[in-house]
Amino acid sequence: MPRLAHRIPRIFHAVLLALGCALAGGAPFAFAADTLNVYSIWPENWARPMFEEFEKASGIKVNFVRFSSGEALARVIAEKNNPRVDVLFGGPVETFAAGISEGVFEPYKPPSFGKLPARFRHPDGQWIAIADDPLVFMANEKFLKEHNLKAPASWSDLLNPAYKDMLQMADARTSGTAVTRIFSILEVNGRDEAKAFDYMKKLRPQVQLYTKSGGGGTLPVGLGQAGGGIFFIVDALDTKAKGYDVAISFPREGIGTSAEAIALIKGAKNPDQAKKLIDWASSPAMQNLFAKYKINFVPAHPDVVLEPGLAAVLKGAKIFPIDADYAGANRKRIVDRWVAEVLNL
């Protein structure tokens, strides 16, 4: 006991010295980094490396939960009087456009705002694009060979009897991929809703399953449990990269592409940290990392060079941007009509 009593002053002095160093910003004590909270529409395997890179660059840790776009939007709206997150990250811009009328976003214009093309930024800064993501057709190669088919090159090709009960694609109640698909069909039909819904009703018997998330059908197509489907290119190329024998194609009539966006939540608890994430994500700092992590998004920032392999896939494809304002204004009505007239057919 006397020996311990002799040591107590030295121990106490050491603790005070260490605490003093920590308060001064030095070692040996390290306080927790700044944090912010995010709903990510991007799957975890794409979002996590981006957030880890952001933390390395900024010292700010991102706590995130992943939801499909419909779920994320519903949560942000439900929580708008007491937001649980600071940022909505990723997902089709139509989702963000639909959120504007609900008053869930705080306008913010990051440094990249002025460099981006008009379709990649909301004029008031309600959202800003961080990538572009075209839709594609994806088919199982073995299925095509067994049915003596070529990769689908027209929307009408998906009505071939061979595809009956053999397609998988996303459910518009939960997935932004599905909303982009529906608005692609509307555009191809000149926004003639009667013609567009007539096509979707004809397509309905071909669909064995409408999946909760946009990429949910990619593995069944890869495994040959389904013959094909309509997906964002980032999901389709990820399936191909994993070694599944699939064909990726585009319809000659054209197919939509949707900007992937990010937005500041109104009433965010950590607005300063949130703005730093938006600054970073909308700049080449993040978008140059897509190729490193083999994430096949098309960069939104004009200073980021498109990865050559992705450029080769897109060459010659007829791709048109989805009108975010039109889609946002009509999203709920069109999805409700799709549920009533197509899903429940």
Image (cartoon, grey):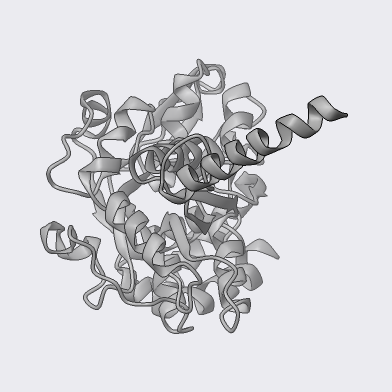
Residue at image location 57% in from the left, 74% down from the top: 83
- In the rendered structure, the answer to whether residue 8 lies left or right of residue 206 reads right
- Measured as percent of width and height from the top left, residue 113 is found at 18, 63
Q: Can residue 345 be seen in the rendering of this structure?
A: no
Residue that extends furthest to the right in the rendered view of this protein: 1
- In the rendered structure, the answer to whether residue 327 lies left or right of residue 244 reads left
Q: Is residue 6 above or below residue 212?
A: above
286 vs 251, nearest the viewer? 286
183 vs 9, nearest the viewer? 9
Residue at image location 50% in from the left, 67% down from the top: 197
87 vs 185, nearest the viewer? 87
- Measured as percent of width and height from the top left, residue 65 is found at 60, 52
- Measured as percent of width and height from the top left, residue 166 is found at 63, 37
Q: Can residue 122 be seen in the rendering of this structure?
A: yes
Residue at image location 45% in from the left, 72% down from the top: 265
- Measured as percent of width and height from the top left, residue 17 is found at 52, 41
Residue at image location 59% in from the left, 36% down from the top: 14
- Count of labels in the image: 0
